[in-house]
Image (cartoon, grey):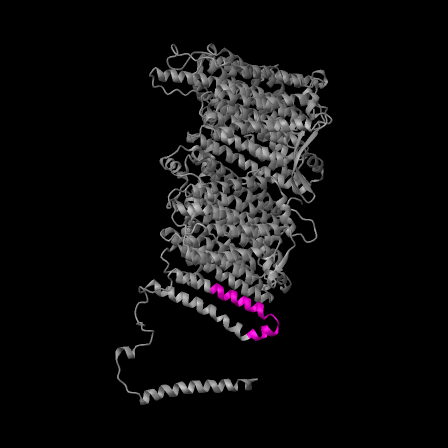
Amino acid sequence: MDPELLIELVILLPLLGAAFNGLLGLFQPAHRTREKLIGTVATAMVAIPFLIAVYLFATFDGEAIVATVFTWMAAGDLTVNFAFRIDQLSLLMTMIITGVGGLIHLYSTGYMHGDDGYWRFFAYLNLFIFAMLNLVLGNNLVVLFLGWEGVGLCSYLLIGFWYKDLKNSAAANKAFIMNRIGDFAFLMAMFILFREIGALDFDSLLAGASSMDQSSINWAVLLLFIGATGKSAQIPLFTWLPDAMAGPTPVSALIHAATMVTSGLYLLARLSVIVLSAPVIMTVIAVVGALTALVAATIAITQNDIKKVLAYSTISQLGYMFLATGVGAFYVAIFHVMTHAFFKACLFLGSGSVIHSMHHVEHELAKDGHGHELDAQDMRTMGGLGKYMPATRMTFLISTLAIAGIPLFSGFFSKDEILFKAFEFGYDGHLVGWLVYGVGIVTALLTAVYMTRAYVLTFEGEERWPHADTIHPHESPWSMTTPLWILAGLAAVGGLVGIPAVIAHGDLNWIHHFLAGDQAPVAEYAVHGHVPVALEWGLIAFSSLIALFGVGLAWKWYSTEGPAFDEKLSARFGGLYRLWKGKYFVDEAYDRAIVRPLIGGAIHGLAPFDKYVVDGLVNFVGFFTRGASFTLRYIQTGIVHSYAAAIVFGVILLGWLMLS
Amino acid sequence: MWGDMAATLSLVIVSLAGLALVVFDAFNNRHVATPWIAGLALLAGFIFEIVGLGGPEGTAYSDMLRTGGSAAFVNALVLGSGVLTVILSVPYLKKIGHNIGEVYALILFATVGMLVLGAANNLIAVFVGLETMSICLYILTGFVRSESGSAESALKYFLLGAFSTGFFLYGIALLYGATGTMDFSAMKAGVEDGGGVMFWGGVSLLLVGFLFKVSAAPFHMWTPDAYQGAPTPIAGFMATASKTAAFGALIIILYKALPTERWTDVLAVFAVITMVVGNIIALSQQNVKRMLAYSSIAHAGYVLVGLSSGLVEGYSGALFYLMVYVIMNIGAFGVVALLEWDGKEGSEQTLDSLAGVGYRKPLLGWAMVVFMFSLSGFPPLAGFLGKWAVFAPAVDAGLVWLAIIGVLASAVSAYYYLRVLVVMFMKTETEASSKLADSFTIPRSSAAVIVLCVILLFVFGLTTSVIELTDGFFQSGSVATVLGP
Amino acid sequence: MLSDFIPFFIQLGIAIGLSFTLLKAAALIGPKRANVIKQGTYESGMDPIGSAHQRYSVKFYLVAMIFIVFDVEIVFLYPWAVSFREFIAAGVGPGVLGVIFLFVIILAIGLVYDIKKGGLEFD
């Protein structure tokens, strides 16, 4: 079949699904309660594109295909086409998005059952898939930007989905605005690239990169990276992601773990040729990524809300991916995007399943007249859930081992490759490589600890909710557990596509050949000094040991003492622990330094300035104004004359600028 | 003479219709046909200008007015805005009990002024157009005499307008003194020795007059008061058509009459002040119309960014931006007008009173979503393309810092645009909004206007043919484009 | 050059002389019976001394404004009438006649509107 037609179908079907559910729901209130129909259509509109993507993947011959739908902008010698691109990178991303997305749709049909906004939810979710596909399939920066903004919008809509709680809409606003800051950096980067190269489609951009001078390359890459930090929640723009957990859990799984937050990585990988020619900025990227990984991991240890732990874990893992980008290993970053999509989606969906059943406990408690306010997301009131929810427990465990980097699980392969690439970069003479390798190892230990902590506190040990002897949670329906099993399976074996180079001379490292092969779109840093094979084996053994050690340690701590062990940690680390617990007080700092002055300035500074302060100028400007104020004195409003003074002020300013 | 009249047929039609309306209204007060006459006359003019868009450029009335080209474009915007305003005004004015015939005659006369202003080729024509427009707008602002806020804002507008007109007129005098001509095309040639104080002083004072009319800071202070006091559809008309006409004349003066030096930096400074002041103050506004007023101030700043590039791409981008701006604001003011449910609410409507509206009136809610996103420059809506069209030339002209401030300012603006959507969709319904939902149905004509605006925002966001059109107005030889380097 | 102005200066001298002569003559031969009103400055019947902030009927302004508008606009007819012969000579007579008709019609429309709305009814 014609691949161009197929790719258009891939893009259009989710949009159709969104339009179907959205429009019918909006104008036909009766449609809103047809859950079966809504859920089936929405899921099919993602599942079919997945099948098409698999077909395209199977028939893909290594040659990039560009499908031009129509010419968007044509002016002078520039044309921006509404065009989509099929190559290794976009195919892989499309399969992740539609595959994981389809599973999450299926899961949501069970999870959102009975919600008033069922139709709205699925319309937004489909719309999100549509935007995300635009992002990864677009053949130029403009279409990419369209998707970029679109996913931001959908994320905003879905975080604020339960809009009746004002806290949620505040979180939605925060996410949107932080994203917008990033977006505008992205836009500036686009301006610069456009000015220098004169085109925005990827082929011309990558070909034209060599003709750019170093400072504009640096600026462009730096701005692109700032754009990516906004979307992918890196320092300093990471605080929105934990708050974004206010949205329904499937949303956290799909948007804030598996897909949207990785779009920054996609962007850098797509433009890897340009990024590689800005080594200074790559150092910045590596350091920021490593720091984010470490900072988020330390915060994650102290969190009690299961979704918050996963949120900080996501930030930390994204930090790993940026670290990989910063050392020039773009394909490894994308590899980790993929494995992370599997295990993190599974973890989030598992936490959703837990929350679902804890809500049940909460209801039962309320029915029995126990006025307990049970926080369904607080791990301190869980424990021992494994007995009641075997499927959720098993899948959660598999994913925990995967993210912790236990050998042969998927996370092991991708994370180890990142660490190895960092090491190799250092071996090649870049000191920053050693540095980020060290930070990465520490973070790997922390990751193993906090994920095991989350698993143990939730599924093992004593039941800690009130009246645990009479009230029992239950396993979730099949529509929710099926996706869990599939994702857990992928989390277990998905890493096998990237067997490290030390085995079979890299012949088995399929993902490397696929993404960074001869005709493939992702460039990589050319290493000069190769790490000896023995050392490489040693590194693998070292990081495996670190992971096993972390898991074992945390298991011992938390399975015997439960949440009480946090007290010990707190006593041990003192002020440091409080810093972690307080999330480094970044939110507070932003509030003090930016938000409050801005709003406060608007309310207390500029607005009155607009009305009153100009009065002071009357004296300042002297006789000139007095003439005006004299004639206007009898106008009783009094304010008019300050308005006129502002005009006089403007006249003087303008005259001075013009004549000086 | 007949030839001149044929070339400016829209002007003739609208003038005659205005005169006819005055007589008609004197004998049949509040007749149902009055708005029809006004609307049809404006529509006829609009069609004439649209047809003339592709035609050759020329001049009429002894070189006083330009025809075709950018003049036709600006006039089409003004007339289109007029048509939509008349449609939106009829139900609104009925609701507040002020559906008097003079309003439509005044809209027509104001339009006549704008047509002269937008097509002016001579400083005298600019002045005549500016004053004809302004005097009608003063009256329109205050014609709901029973409301003290309305009268107050009209008085303020009038006094400040008269004040700025003084500067403007003095600027014209100085320019005439320095160059010996008032004709745009002859002015550049008349500049001697790089201008001198008299010439640049004249330019300064001329700019004061324009900056006042387009409400750039710090000449903006009348704007929130005037928009708040004026009946809402009329405020939309003031915000869109009058700014478009004033910018149209300013663009032509910069393009044809002035040497490209000095004023570019000056306009860049005022663009910064305007964007910052407009966006920051809008953050703290509780009143919807005041918020829209500060937003319109900020948008004047964006247009100024394009102009301060001093490049033809900047001028054509600015014209495109004006078109987008007209569509967004007619729509936004239209929605706000429909959401008012008793005459008083107009000047007192706060953001909180919109709570939950998005679910009770989905059409208005979702239309507002589109307008707000477009205003904040969100792709693929036309607002995004517009911002691109004015910021890109600034980068081309080396004013990267200006573009950075511009995009940062519009990042800030997302906050207050979004807040409208938050209260519309994310806040629980209060008493007031349930009263609103029960008490009115959306008139079909207004709904059609709003839907039209929404559609146009999507269409113009996805095609750049209009930018190519506006590019064509400024092409003298070289192939220039806002999209190309 | 200056000689061109001789008639003007003669005219000026006559005007000044005449006014002085008349005033002096009136002072010399007129009867003098003073009272308050006669001694006061002539100001259209208003008391010229005191606060200017008084309340007037708004109708007063309305009529005054309408008068001024029409008065000033009618003045435009004068230069037109003076040069109409030359317009005819230049062959544009009918066109210029048309223009002035348009002008008068516009004024007439204003007048009709004014009368209809009761702008001239001073009650």
Was residue A590 drawn as part of the magenta stretch in this picture? Answer: no
Tell me where the magenta segment starts and ends, as one range: C83-107
In screen coordinates, is B52 left or right of B228? right
* Count of marks placed on residues: 0
> Which quadrant is home to the N terminus of chain A?
top right
* Horizontal side of residue A230 vs A276, given as left or right: left
Residue shown at the point (38%, 48%) measured from the top left: B97
A65 lies left or right of A451: right
Magenta stretch secondary structure, dominant: helix
Q: Quadrant of the C terminus of chain A?
A: bottom right
Residue A343 location in percent, x, y?
Answer: 56, 19
Image side of residue B336 versus residue A404, left or right:
left
Q: Please indicate, yes or no, whether residue A507 appears anywhere in the rendered image.
A: yes
Query: x, y percentage for residue A166?
Result: 42, 31
B332 w.r.t. B176: above or below: above
Q: Position of residue A62 (x, y in %)?
A: 72, 25
